[in-house]
Amino acid sequence: RAGLPPTPVGVTALRAWSWRAARSGVEGQLVSPTTGTPAAAGDVVTELLQWVDPVLAEQHEDEEVHAVVTDILREGSGARVQRDAYATHHQWREVIEAALTQGTPTAAEPSGNGEV
């Protein structure tokens, strides 16, 4: 933003950060790319959105992306929903149903593509 190049980050650190993100998901902590330290996933995602918001707005995708991200941060990742379904029902059928229905709009919600 200030016209300065980003702080260089080595491949090893990027791989470690990626592993942490895959392991923790939005329920845990992610590494902030600006500080290089762990922070709540919601804070790191919000920080990222601040960086990409101008482009999202330019493409008229900011509202949709914010809605999806808010939903994921509130409801949890697909993996969390599936783990919760298994923990509740101990049936793989429930896990598959949770995976298939997560994020699917109900009849009252617009699907985002003009269909209801």
Image (cartoon, rainbow, N blue to C red):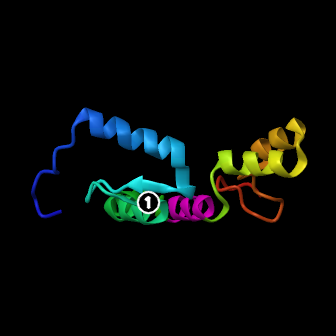
> Which residue is at a point 46% across and 46% down the rendered structure image?
21
The one nearer the camera, 68 or 13, is 13
Q: Position of residue 17 (x, y in %)?
A: 37, 43
Residue 71 in the magenta stretch? The answer is: yes
Q: Position of residue 36 (x, y in %)?
A: 27, 54
Q: Is residue 7 left or right of residue 100?
A: left
Which span is picked out in magenta?
63-73
The residue at the far left in this view is 4
Q: Is residue 52 left or right of residue 97?
A: left
- Work out whether 90 lies above or below 31: above
Mark 1 residue crowding within 10 angstroms, few (<14) / some (14–19) / many (20+) = some
The one nearer the camera, 43 or 100, is 43
Residue 60 in the magenta stretch? The answer is: no
The one nearer the camera, 56 or 82, is 82
**Toward which corner of the image does residue 106 lie, by quadrant?**
bottom right
Placement of the N terminus among the 4 image quadrants: bottom left
> Which residue is at a point 89% across and 38% down the rendered structure image?
93
Q: Position of residue 26 (x, y in %)?
A: 54, 55
Q: Main secondary structure of the magenta part?
A: helix
> Which residue is at a point 86% across and 36% down the rendered structure image?
92
Q: Which amino acid type is marked by label 1?
A: Val
Callout 1: SS: helix
- How many discs mark residues in the rendered view? 1
Report which residue position mark 1 lands on.
45
> Which residue is at a point 17% across and 51% down the rendered structure image?
6
